[in-house]
């Protein structure tokens, strides 16, 4: 349920309303937009008398909503959320390129890539330290050493870093990671989501391979219900009957999510297609569809990459992609620093 307040509501009446709602065990999310203040009521709202609230002088309208996600719902929070990740903003018109290797392999590799993507306009550096792999025999990442190398690249370039966590037991290793990624396989790892909801770290939440948009938003809700409202959603492709591409990039998810939620929405055309030649056209399409950012895999030697070389761009190809994005969305990713 949402309660839309009139302009400049009497503070005493508002306090009385909030106290009464809290006495009914209703949690209240107060959203103050440019023109409107909205109270989002979370809990068993069947005990709330709509007619009684509607009759109050300070109330413009009362509406019940049916969506099970409340904190992530745009109806509760009509203005776009803007996240500030160590000085880099995303959402609400702030666009960012997040780029780097699928997996951290060496100091020379990650620092070289970090410097090149920064020079092309990237605002954040991505890099895998812990790698979920289908095969137990595939390269699993450098683990804690990989985090250390990412932090060294951060010192060199100043770029905030993004890396994927596999289990909450690893959280102590992510203390200096600026944006914690939840991969597609963990989108419904609810215990992990609940624990991350207790942190004050921004979270990048990827859509599961076979998950609906509502399921994605409910996973975001797990994080936000714990008190952490710093969530970015990522469309990274879903599993369909098509086998030529690694997954199928659901471009329609971007404008749909933008209408359903106030959270920033980005796209990952690298994992979605699995083919480097498709990354640029799908990246441009995602930007045209309204994405708040792109997550792009970049490697200085894709042919010899230890992980996902076939979908990684070279630094030169990434520079070309970044230049093309500028033509679709001019000045989209200025540094915001």
Image (cartoon, rainbow, N blue to C red):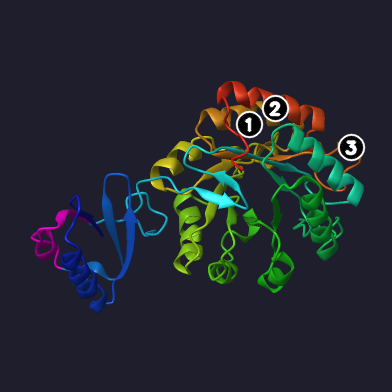
Q: Which of marks 2 and 1 is nearer the N terminus?
A: 1
Q: Residues within 10 Å of mark 1 (few under 14, many from 20)?
A: many
Q: Does the magenta stretch include residue 75?
A: no
The kind of secondary structure element at disc 1 is helix
User: 57 and 100: which one is in front?
Assistant: 57
User: 93 and 26: which one is in front?
Assistant: 93
Q: Is residue 164 left or right of residue 306?
A: left
Q: Residues within 10 Å of mark 2 (few under 14, many from 20)?
A: some
299 is higher (above) or lower (below) than 82: above
The magenta segment is: 49-63
Give me the residue at 28% from left, 77% from top.
Answer: 25
Residue 253: x, y in percent? 49, 40
Q: Do the residues labelled 2 and 1 touch (CB within 8 Å)?
A: yes
Residue 77: x, y in percent? 36, 51
110 is higher (above) or lower (below) than 62: above
Give me the residue at 85% from left, 46% from top.
Answer: 111
Give the residue number, with chain letter if any, for mark 1: 283
Give the residue number, with chain letter if any, for mark 2: 321
Q: Which of marks 2 and 3 is nearer the N terminus?
A: 3
Marks 2, 1: nearer the viewer: 2
Give the residue number, with chain letter if any, for mark 3: 301
Q: Do we see residue 206 in this rendering?
A: no
Q: Earlier in the sequence, mark 1 or mark 3?
A: 1
Residue extending farthest top: 327
Q: Is residue 200 left or right of residue 107?
A: left
């Amino acid at each position: 349920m949402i309660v839309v307040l009139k302009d400049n509501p009497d503070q005493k009446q508002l306090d009385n309303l909030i106290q009464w709602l809290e006495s009914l065990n209703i949690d209240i999310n107060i959203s103050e937009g440019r023109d409107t203040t909205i109270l989002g009521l979370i809990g068993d709202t069947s005990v709330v008398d709509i007619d009684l609230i509607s009759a109050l002088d300070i109330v413009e309208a009362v509406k019940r909503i049916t969506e099970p996600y409340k904190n992530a719902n745009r109806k509760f929070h009509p203005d776009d959320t803007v996240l500030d990740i160590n000085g880099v903003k995303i959402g609400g018109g702030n666009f960012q390129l997040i780029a780097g290797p699928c997996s951290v392999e060496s100091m020379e590799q990650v620092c070289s890539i970090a410097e090149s993507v920064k020079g092309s306009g990237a605002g954040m550096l991505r890099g895998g330290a812990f790698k979920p792999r289908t095969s137990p025999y595939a390269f699993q990442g450098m683990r804690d050493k990989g985090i250390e190398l990412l932090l060294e690249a951060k010192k060199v370039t100043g770029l905030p870093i993004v890396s994927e966590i596999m289990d909450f037991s690893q959280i102590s290793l992510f203390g200096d990671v600026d944006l914690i990624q939840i991969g597609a396989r963990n989108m419904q790892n609810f215990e992990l989501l609940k624990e991350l909801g207790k942190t004050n770290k921004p979270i990048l939440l990827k859509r599961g391979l076979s998950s609906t948009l509502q399921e994605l938003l409910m996973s975001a809700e797990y994080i936000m219900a714990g008190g952490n409202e710093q969530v970015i959603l990522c469309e990274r492709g879903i599993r369909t009957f098509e086998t030529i591409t690694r997954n199928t990039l659901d471009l329609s998810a971007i404008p749909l999510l933008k209408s359903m939620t106030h959270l920033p929405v980005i796209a990952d055309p690298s994992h979605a297609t699995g083919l480097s030649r498709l990354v640029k056209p799908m990246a441009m399409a995602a930007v045209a569809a309204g994405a708040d950012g792109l997550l792009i895999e970049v490697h200085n030697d894709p042919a010899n990459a230890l992980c996902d070389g076939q979908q990684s761009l070279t630094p030169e190809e990434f520079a070309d992609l970044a230049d093309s994005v500028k033509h679709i969305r001019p000045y989209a990713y200025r540094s915001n620093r």
